Image (cartoon, rainbow, N blue to C red):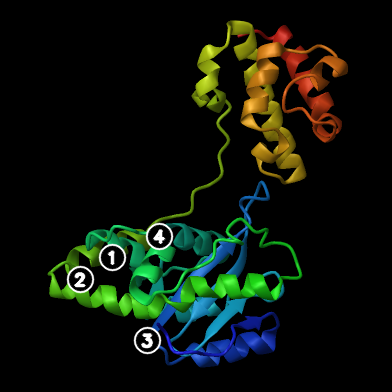
């Protein structure tokens, strides 16, 4: 296991960012991770940047301080170690325009080496005997202030990456697998952000849609589209506006009045207040524009 080191340093002001830049300047190897708020909003944003060297851990709060000066350092050809890098590479390209030309993905390395567990928690436990908590896995990282527990949790996502890199990199080389892994790393570095595109026909992919009659399918179509519009307007994930199971059940029953809608399983008083008008209007529209 890594030797003890100080608690993670929160970077939330320009002077702290300047100190971090100075600390990283001569580091040939840097660990990076990001936390976004995709589980809580319609349009996700990077809410934390975790960075580790062999001696310290930092957490950059991009809501409080502009992290873009870090881009020149992380994009200058030094090796950046990530786990499951595809998502993080897309995020930092989308938010900050950063390219990470030289990465090492510990998940890719572990897969090429045939490790049974590819998650970071599994790898850290297997190699260092430490268990990483999943308590804050779906935390709303966009909310402030962050708690000390959240900061400690986030810092562990990069705390072990450099020693893990050392072990996996050496084994890739000893088994003649390094060149294949490097090619995969280059492909991940080249990925581009995926624009958020709504599919108005996405309701057809819901498994339960196949069990509905034509009128119910028309209702589901309109509910699907109306839910997306409301989610975008209030900046919440669609599933938090109206869950898919409830969406299908409303389409199946097609209530005409508020009282009838209140009787649909999954429709709580809070849900009724928030989206009752939306639902009933979508159902009326389905009657006017059947499938």
In the rendered image, the vertical position of residue 24 relative to residue 168, given as above or below: below
Sequence-wise first label, 3 or 1: 3
In the rendered image, the vertical position of residue 268 relative to residue 30, given as above or below: above
Q: Secondary structure at mark 4?
A: loop
Q: CA distance from mark 3 to mark 1?
A: 19 Å
Label 4: how many residues lie within 10 Å, few (<14), some (14-19) or many (20+)? Answer: some
Q: CA distance from mark 4 to mark 3?
A: 25 Å
Q: Quadrant of the C terminus?
A: top right
Q: Secondary structure at mark 2?
A: helix
Q: Secondary structure at mark 1?
A: helix
Label 3: how many residues lie within 10 Å, few (<14), some (14-19) or many (20+)? Answer: few
Residue marked by disc 2: 172
Nearer-the-camera pick, 276 or 228: 276
Q: Secondary structure at mark 3?
A: loop
Sequence-wise first label, 1 or 2: 1
Residue 277 on image: x %, y %: 84, 25
Identify the residue at horizontal 71%, vertical 27% (top origin). 226
Residue marked by disc 3: 28
Identify the residue at horizontal 27%, vertical 59% (top origin). 111
Q: Nearer the viewer, mark 4 or mark 2?
A: 4
Q: Are marks 1 and 2 in contact (CB under 8 Å)?
A: yes
Residue marked by disc 1: 109
Residue marked by disc 4: 119
């Amino acid at each position: 296991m890594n030797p003890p080191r100080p608690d993670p340093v929160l970077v939330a002001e320009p002077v702290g960012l300047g100190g971090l830049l100075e600390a990283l300047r001569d580091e040939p190897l840097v660990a990076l991770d990001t936390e976004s708020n995709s589980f809580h909003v319609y349009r996700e944003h990077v809410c934390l940047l975790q960075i580790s060297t062999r001696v310290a851990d930092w957490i950059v709060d991009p809501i409080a301080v502009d992290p873009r000066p870090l881009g020149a350092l992380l994009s200058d050809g030094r090796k950046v170690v990530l786990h499951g890098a595809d998502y993080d590479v897309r995020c930092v390209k989308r938010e900050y325009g950063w390219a990470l030309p030289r990465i090492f993905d510990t998940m890719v390395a572990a897969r090429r080496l045939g490790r049974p567990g590819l998650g970071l928690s599994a790898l850290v436990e297997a190699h260092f005997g430490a268990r990483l908590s999943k308590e804050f896995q779906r935390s709303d990282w966009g909310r402030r202030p962050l708690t000390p527990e959240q900061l400690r949790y986030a810092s562990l996502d990069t705390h072990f990456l450099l020693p893990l890199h050392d072990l996996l990199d050496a084994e890739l080389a000893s088994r003649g697998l390094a060149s294949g892994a490097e090619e995969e790393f280059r492909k991940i570095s080249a990925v581009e952000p995926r624009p958020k595109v709504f599919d108005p026909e996405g309701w057809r992919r819901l498994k339960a849609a196949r069990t509905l009659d034509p009128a119910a399918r028309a209702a589901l179509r309109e509910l699907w589209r109306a839910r997306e519009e409301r989610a975008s307007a209030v900046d919440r994930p669609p599933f938090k506006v109206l869950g898919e199971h409830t969406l299908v059940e409303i389409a199946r029953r097609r209530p005409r009045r508020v009282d009838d809608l209140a009787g649909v399983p999954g429709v709580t008083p809070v849900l009724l207040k928030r989206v009752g008008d939306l639902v009933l209007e979508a159902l009326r529209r389905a009657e006017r524009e059947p499938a």
